[in-house]
Image (spheres, rainbow, N blue to C red):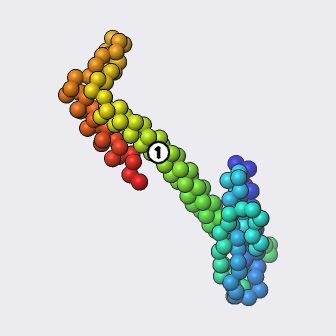
Amino acid sequence: MSHRRSRFASALTMLVLLCAAPAAMSEAVYTWVDEDGVRHFSQQPPENQEYELKNVQVRSPTTPAPTTATGNASTGAQSSLDQRVDDYLSEQDAAQQKRRLSRAEKAAMEQNCQISQQNLITVESRTRVMVPGADGSMRQLTDDERLAAVEQARQDVARYCQN
């Protein structure tokens, strides 16, 4: 949860700085994710770290923020800003989770590909293929069973080795 707060603080700081700009301009903002998965924003690029450069349009507000009877800025505007920051952070979390899943899926596909290729080599190159029987002892596949195993191994290679 502390990572989320840290990211929230970073995002909120960036938004406040961008909103406080005196005139309409384009600002360079560098964003990156550190080894702990925390997203950072800065006007300076990080050293020895991959980053994205974003050009952000910054405009000065045309009217001051509404005030309440006590003279404070409207809490509605602040809660709207908080909601937008929360939405942004949620989107970033979802995107990061999807990238992690994608890497895990790729690793599983590579492993399944290697296993499938080895299985295909085994069942194609041997006329006698031994498998565990129902009672735990080893038995030889019949010719029909071996041909079915070859076909299954080919289908597995086609499914997992798509590169």
One can see residue 76 in this view: no
Which image quadrant for residue 83? bottom right
One can see residue 115 in this view: yes
Which image quadrant for residue 6? bottom right
Q: Residue at x 35, y 36 (%)?
A: 121
- Can you say whether 20 is above or below 134 in the image? below
Q: Position of residue 85 (x, y in %)?
A: 65, 64
48 and 121: which is toward the camera = 121
97 and 91: which is toward the camera = 97
Q: Residue at x 28, y 19 (%)?
A: 140
- Can you say whether 43 is above or below 118 in the image? below
- Can you say whether 122 is above or below 94 in the image? above
Q: Counting other residues with Cα less than 10 Å from the Cα at mark 1, is it few (<14), some (14-19), or many (20 or more)? A: some
Circle 1 residue: 110
Q: Position of residue 134 (x, y in %)?
A: 31, 15
Q: Position of residue 13 (x, y in %)?
A: 76, 68
Q: Position of residue 119 (x, y in %)?
A: 37, 34
Q: Amino acid at mark 1?
A: Glu
Q: Residue at x 53, y 50 (%)?
A: 103
Q: Residue at x 38, y 40 (%)?
A: 117
Tally of numbered discs: 1
Q: Disc 1 on helix, strand or loop?
A: helix
11 and 62: which is toward the camera = 11
Question: Quarter of the image containing the C terminus?
Answer: bottom left
